[in-house]
Image: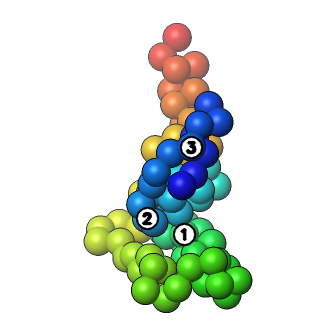
Amino acid sequence: MDIDTQGSLVRRGIISYYAAATMEQATSMQSWVNLIEKKSGDDLTQHKITLFHKPMLHISGDPNIAVIGAPRLIDIAEQFDKNAS
């Protein structure tokens, strides 16, 4: 279980949990995978999850693609809007 943005408990899968917990800090797909790896590794070390439950993800494609909503993308969109005006 996890808590959503309104404070309600939500049932999530293990990958969804780590994806949601790390997306805000990610700047690229590879950084997102690295953050998921670190967070789940920390939880494994602290015996919060087992090795069976630890996500093992990899990227097929360009690992440098920006994550939607990442700060860099928001800056680019704002700059585009300014130039379009």
Vertical relation: 20 (above or below) 15: above
Query: Who's the residue at 70% across and 83% down the image?
Result: 46
Q: Of circles 2 and 1, which is in front? A: 2
Q: Secondary structure at mark 1?
A: helix
Residue on which the image places disc 1 = 36
User: What amino acid is labelled 2 in the image?
Assistant: Ile
User: What amino acid is labelled 1 in the image?
Assistant: Ile
Q: CA distance from mark 2 to mark 1?
A: 9 Å
Query: Who's the residue at 50% across and 45% down the image?
Result: 10
Residue on which the image places disc 2 = 15
Label 2: few (<14), some (14–19) or many (≥20) C-alpha neighbours in 10 Å: some
Quadrant of residue 72 in the image?
A: top right
Q: Of circles 3 and 1, which is in front? A: 3
Which corner quadrant holds the N terminus?
bottom right
Instruction: Point out the residue furthest to the top here.
Output: 85
Q: Secondary structure at mark 3?
A: strand
Do the residues bearing badges 2 and 1 touch, measured as CB atoms within 8 Å?
Answer: yes
Instruction: Depth check: give the residue in front, 56 or 81.
Output: 56
Query: Who's the residue at 46% across and 51% down the image?
Result: 11
| Residue 17 visible, this angle | yes
Residue on which the image places disc 3 = 9
Where is residue 32 shown, x and y percent of the image? 52, 63
Which is nearer the N-term, disc 3 or disc 1? 3
Instruction: Depth check: give the residue in front, 38 or 1.
Output: 1
Quadrant of residue 34 in the image?
A: bottom right
Q: Secondary structure at mark 2?
A: helix
